[in-house]
Image (tube, helix red, strand yellow):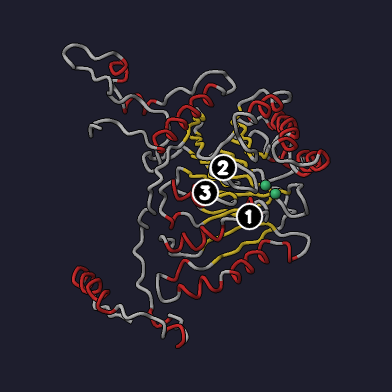
Amino acid sequence: MKSSQPTITPFSIAAALAMLGAFALGCAQANGEPPKPKEADTQAAPDADAASKPADSSGKFSPVKARARDFYAPNSEDLGPNEMRLIACGTGMPTARPKQAASCWLLELGNGDKFIFDIGTGSAERIAALQIPYNYLDKVFLSHLHTDHFGDLDALFVGGALAGRQKPLRVWGPSAETPERGTKYALDHLRKALTWDLDGRQGLTDPRGYHLDVNEFDYMGMNAVIYQENGVTIRSFPAIHSLDGPVSFVVEWNGFKFVFGGDTYPNKWYAKYAKGADLAIHECFIAVPDMIDKFKFTPQSALAVGTQIHTAPEAFGKVMSIIKPRMAVAYHFFKDFDTTASINERIRTTYDGPLSLSIDYMVWNITKDEIRVRMAIVDEDVWPPPATEKPQAPDQSKRIPYSPEISGGKLDMKKVLQPVYDEINKQYGTHEKQE
Ligand SMILES: [Zn+2]
Ligand SMILES: [Zn+2]
């Protein structure tokens, strides 16, 4: 094979599929037209027209000349001062799968603030793909305490601290009817469950990130303010799901209104407080017949779970018809070739406004003039980006020693490892010695 031959890799296939998906989705917007490219895109590729012409005999125009692109590449676009960017980091179900993690939404504001709403099972990997330094990812808001909405909190807590969040992870979540069902109880016990993990890290890395700052708020608050910093106000109101406790959130910033709805039976508070949102996320459960056919639920369970504990697609449409957002976003279903059409048809029996049937890595750029919907193309080889602050060297006296029995089982590797110490001490001017 010639070295110049292009190689089809899984990544390039995935990228191509994602681009096709984004294009198909763009076509499926309410007005039936693909999204218009922003001015920036035409500026980025001034010869876009020329590029579409075939190569002439002079070779002036290359058939492989770059054209305007319509996907989001993480860490490649500045956010405007009056712009918000939302990225779906989990759109699926309690059983996470390669294509869809469970509920997780990253909201970035033009003032530099970043907020994570829910961090369901599998979603920490999606957050990692966005190439955002971890010291900016320190604020998480939980809609409720089902694992598909907070199951990857441990991964962000520990992995984020290891990768550069040199401060506590701040978490907001609801109370419940009893203290044992509240967020504080859950996270105190998560912290206890991580005792071995956290004890074993003492004295090895910067310790400042391994703390949870838990803010439990009243789940009965009616559009009550739970956060107000840097020109951003976040409110909560109750949802109706499984037990008392679940909530939804409203973010107000710079004249924008963003609503994140947690799991719920359609409720009057969402109908009231989400009204007129720029972008409104609301759960939309998989259609009942698909729950029976594909998830093997009994008809009784499918009807109870799919219409009474959650919001059925028809009911999702009804809610959106009441609140009339600039963009309605549906999630909480496995989005496949054989489920999407049914969900869309069912929503369209009750709603004909702008709609995104979300999938992981879908991206919304929101300005006063436009809501642009694209897919992110991610690099599977990505490493954590450098933190903007330098890490502290650990206090090695904090190490918890092995027992003599375990310590005594070490093979003698001193000679093998000394060159590593010599190399690093020479390069960095340190004086480290083997244990
Ligand atoms: Zn739930
Ligand atoms: Zn859920």
Which residue corresponds to mark 3? 231
Viewer-side residue, 379 vs 29: 379
Foreground: disc 1 or disc 2: 2
The picture places residue 294, in percent across and down from the top left corner, at 69, 37
Which residue corresponds to mark 2? 100
**Count of marks, rendered view:** 3
Local crowd at mark 1 within 10 Å, few (<14), some, or many (≥20)?
A: some
Asked where in the image residue 183 lies, by quadrant, the reply is bottom right
Asked where in the image residue 175 lies, by quadrant, the reply is bottom right
Q: CA distance from mark 2 to mark 3?
A: 33 Å
Q: Is mark 3 within 8 Å of ligand 2?
A: no
Task: Identify which amino acid the numbered label 3 is placed on.
Answer: Gly
Which residue corresponds to mark 1? 226
Task: Identify which amino acid the numbered label 1 is placed on.
Answer: Ile
Residue shown at 37%/53% (left/top)? Answer: 385
Foreground: disc 2 or disc 3: 2
